[in-house]
Image (tube, rainbow, N blue to C red):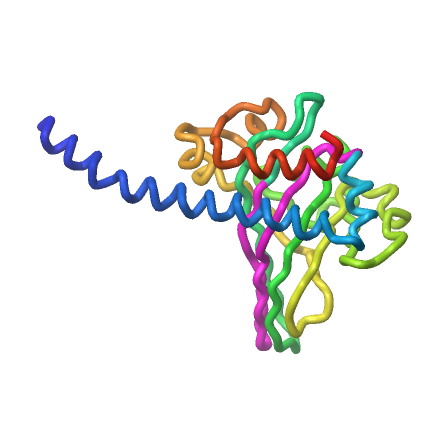
């Protein structure tokens, strides 16, 4: 019996390693997205918002394709901020679907800058649909648009985005943002709710340190 258990454990090790590799890749891509987007010379408005942020949700690759029926989706990570700095990331997914006369393909990067406790709590819920909750204001700004902080003064969350592809701009209205507790468990080695990571600053994985340092660089700590 012991031999069977040991054999099963050894067989499961590659699966766990693969899952962590997949998640670490998302964290690494999120780090590069923060560096590229907030380090851009046209990102002054976004950097100013970061200095008063409560947290961020970084989506390094939201892929959209459509021919009559369209949809978009991708993985994201969320980190919360308090006086001690930035938290370990919690894993999320963003997805949406649409029907209409459309054709094209798009690859977008989005950073959701969370400015209020209301906005933070909305994203901490298991699912949040952009535009469905009228009490949570979400503003969208594109890279290179100056003076955009004026439009974001009363927003709870500001979505700062860049995109490549045939679709014009980035549409996030109606997108569903959902927690991925199973990814948290694999990455941290035990069950971890988004609330524990983002608010309580629990959890530890050295692979996320570059992301925390990059966020601190663009938020003043």
Q: Residue at position x 65%, y 32% from top?
A: 80
Side (left or right) of 171 relative to 12? right
Q: Residue at position x 64%, y 39% from top?
A: 214
Question: Residue 217 occupies which quadrant of the picture?
Answer: top right
Q: Which residues are magenta?
A: 52-77
Q: In x, y percent, where is residue 139?
A: 79, 50
Identify whether 97 is placed above or below 27.
below
Q: Residue at position x 67%, y 21% from top?
A: 84
- Is residue 53 magenta-colored? yes
Identify whether 69 is placed above or below 85.
below
Q: Nearer the viewer, residue 181 or 47?
A: 47
Q: Nearer the viewer, residue 220 or 175?
A: 220
Question: Residue 109 occupies which quadrant of the picture?
Answer: bottom right
Q: In x, y percent, where is residue 9?
A: 21, 34
Q: Nearer the viewer, residue 215 or 135?
A: 215
Question: Residue 133 occupies which quadrant of the picture?
Answer: top right
- Quarter of the image with the C terminus is top right
Q: Residue at position x 75%, y 32% from top?
A: 220
Can residue 26 be seen in this snapshot? yes
Main secondary structure found in the magenta portion: strand
Side (left or right) of 216 relative to 194? right
Numbered marks: total: 0
Can residue 122 be seen in this snapshot? no
Q: In x, y percent, where is residue 110?
A: 66, 53
Q: Nearer the viewer, residue 221 or 183?
A: 221
- Quarter of the image with the N terminus is top left
- Is residue 56 magenta-colored? yes
Q: In x, y percent, where is residue 31?
A: 59, 45
């Amino acid at each position: 019996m012991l031999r069977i258990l040991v054999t099963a454990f050894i067989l499961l090790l590659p699966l766990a390693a693969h899952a962590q590799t997949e998640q670490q890749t998302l964290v690494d891509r999120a780090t590069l997205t923060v560096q590229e987007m907030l380090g851009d010379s046209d990102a002054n408005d976004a950097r100013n918002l970061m200095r008063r942020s409560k947290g961020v949700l970084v989506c390094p690759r939201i892929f959209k394709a459509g021919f009559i029926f369209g949809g978009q989706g991708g993985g994201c990570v969320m980190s919360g901020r308090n006086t001690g700095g930035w938290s370990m990331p919690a894993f999320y997914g963003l997805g949406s679907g649409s029907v209409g006369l459309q054709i094209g393909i798009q690859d977008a990067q989005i950073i959701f800058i969370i400015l209020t406790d209301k906005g933070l709590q909305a994203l901490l819920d298991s699912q949040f649909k952009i535009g469905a909750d009228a009490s949570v204001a979400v503003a969208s700004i594109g890279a290179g648009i100056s003076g955009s902080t004026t439009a974001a003064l009363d927003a709870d969350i500001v979505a700062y985005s860049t995109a490549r592809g045939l679709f014009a701009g980035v549409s996030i209205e109606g997108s569903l943002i959902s927690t991925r507790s199973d990814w948290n468990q694999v990455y941290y080695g035990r069950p971890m709710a988004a609330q524990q990571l983002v608010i309580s600053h629990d959890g530890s994985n050295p692979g996320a340190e570059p992301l925390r340092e990059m966020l601190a660089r663009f938020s003043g700590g």
